[in-house]
Image (tube, grey):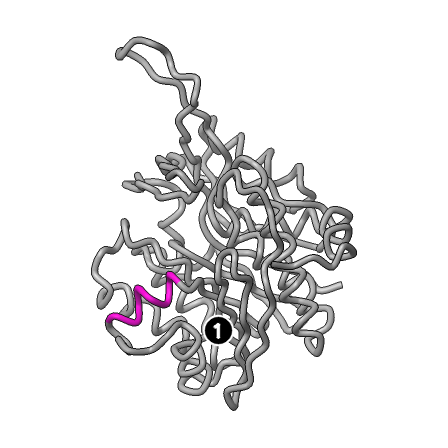
Amino acid sequence: MTRFVVCGETLIDLVKSAEAPRDHFSSTWFALSAGGPMNTAVALGRLGADCHFLGRLSSDDFGVQLRNHIESAGVLLDLATVTDQSTSIAVVTLDADGVASYAFHFADTANFNWRPGELPVLDRADWLHIASLACVVKPGADVLLDWAASVQAPISYDINVRPTVITDPAAYWALVEPWLQVVGRGNGVVKASDEDLKFLARVVSPSATPDELAAQWVEQYDLGLAVVTLGAGGAVAVRRGGESVRVAGFPTSVVDTVGAGDTFMAGFLDGYVSDPADLVGALRRGAAAASIVCSRKGAQPPTTAEVNALLALGQTG
């Protein structure tokens, strides 16, 4: 079995309770274990994968919550670092359709201060998945980029743009492009949502659709594959030569979209790494996992049995 090493940040998502106090002196919030890469690791663990989370975790009470959440999914923390720096916080706002937006509080927190000695040696028997803010928030992002360039393992990279953290598309692109170069050297996989690509296209190729921009990146950076998630519309994967494979989404009653893309990636990798030839099957596995997580409050990924049951129904939108 392939060892998945998932690298990136953990967070506590603060989501306001609908049952708020009647006065204006206090408010009630849920403190949910979160962070895109951590969500993917937890989802892989629940799918039965051999998964190890490579992150910097705080020793504070929120850090204890996060460690317990990760380990309860069967994910190992043997590669993680524990630090006295505090846990990062994200204040979550949900719109009428359950789509989340985030205000992040990162100053002097655990996630973004990587040191080279904290990072392991990986070989071709491993699969490195790296994602999101850890790849763009300095100083740790520079350390991770240098390390990723040296690993022998195949790499998947989820861009997961957060424009509230870096508002300028040109500045964001300057941090993303080196990751595309590193992933391309190893014939790796890049994943982005259609909204991620629309944001970056303002700088890279303003007239390109998300599909077209993904296809450009596959050729320009010699990627093995680019995967674009389309929300309720499913997902599309683009190979070299412009070949694309598209699957529809699975209908669901959306509670919120927190963790949808992260869970999609876990489902996709679970299928793709075991059988790269079955690209349709991997995309459908990702879409099914994302559909299930959207039917739940917060990032609560499904088990293998739940994903298989939905796939057996064969119903897509």
User: Which quadrant, please, contains the C terminus?
Assistant: bottom right
Q: Is residue 235 left or right of residue 305?
A: left
| Relative side of 188 to 268, left or right | left
Q: Where are the magenta residues, as a range?
A: 195-202
The front one of 295 and 89 is 295
The answer to whether residue 284 of the structure is visible from this angle is yes
- Give the residue number, with chain letter if any, for mark 1: 150
**Most distant residue in the bottom direction:** 241
- Closest to the observer, 274 or 110: 274
Question: Going 37% across and 39% down the picture, which residue do you hit?
Answer: 95
Main SS, magenta region, reads helix
Viewer-nearest residue: 220 or 281: 281
| Relative to 100, residue 314 above or below | below
Residue 87 colored in magenta in the image: no
Query: In percent of the image, x 41 and y 30: which residue is there?
Result: 15
Quadrant in the rendering for residue 123: bottom right
The type of residue carrying mark 1 is Ser
- Residue 181, given in percent of the width and then of the height, sits at 40, 78
| Residue 258, horizontal then vertical, whole percent | 48, 44
Q: Nearer the viewer, residue 50 or 44?
A: 44
Residue 76 point in image, percent of width and height = 65, 46
Q: Is residue 114 left or right of residue 292?
A: left
Secondary structure found at label 1: loop
Tell me how many marks there are: 1
